[in-house]
Amino acid sequence: MTEANHFYILGFDPGRDKCGVAVRSAAGLIVEHQVIPAGEAIAILQTLCQRYPIAQIVLGNQTTAKQWQREVQRALPDIAIALVDERYSTLEARDRYWQMYPPQGLQKLMPQSLRQISRPIDDIVAILLIERYLQAQT
């Protein structure tokens, strides 16, 4: 078991308008995930870090990542931040969405590529960032 398995990890998919967040427990369960307004992101991250024993923040490395990394580090200076490659994560998140929320009714008959996802999936990207981080640690 790696050291990363002994604490909670917060995944953060930053964006200009909205961000995805997810918290993975020490037992490997996703205990929380949501899409949040970018303007509220720092306050929500601080709240999550008070609610859970977060020892690592995993941040997507693409859109505005460096700016967000500085802001998060300033707001939460005692928590380590790791940048994770988020290339193709949105495509992967679409697939994961249908695993987490199987289609109902007529949507079951449609090819997955034609199905419409009814909400933003930035939180699922945050879950994938945590998984990518943990895979890189092994």
Image: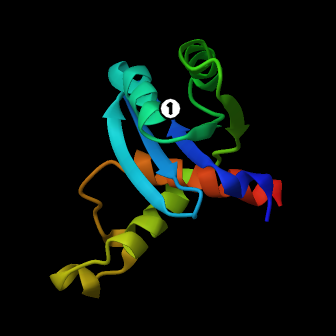
**91 relative position to 82: left or right:** left
Question: Where's the N terminus, which quadrant?
Answer: bottom right
Looking at the image, which residue is at 59% across and 57% down?
26
- Residue 63, given in percent of the width and then of the height, sits at 57, 29
Q: As drawn, is 132 to the left or to the right of 102?
A: right
Q: Quadrant of the C terminus?
A: bottom right
Q: Is residue 38 visible?
A: no
Q: Is residue 56 above or below residue 24?
A: above
Q: Image point 62% across, 22% down: which residue?
A: 69
Residue 96: x %, y % from top left: 47, 67
Depth check: give the residue in front, 11 or 94. 11
Report the residue at 27% width, 84% height from top.
108
Q: Nearer the viewer, residue 15 or 50?
A: 50
Outermost top residue: 74
Where is residue 41? Give x, y as percent: 40, 26
Can residue 136 be seen from the camera position used here?
yes
Q: Which residue is mark 1?
A: 14
Q: Is residue 82 above or below residue 64?
A: below
Amino acid type assigned to the residue bearing label 1 in the image: Pro
The kind of secondary structure element at disc 1 is: loop
Q: Is residue 80 left or right of residue 52?
A: right
Residue at the (38%, 28%) spot, across then down: 44
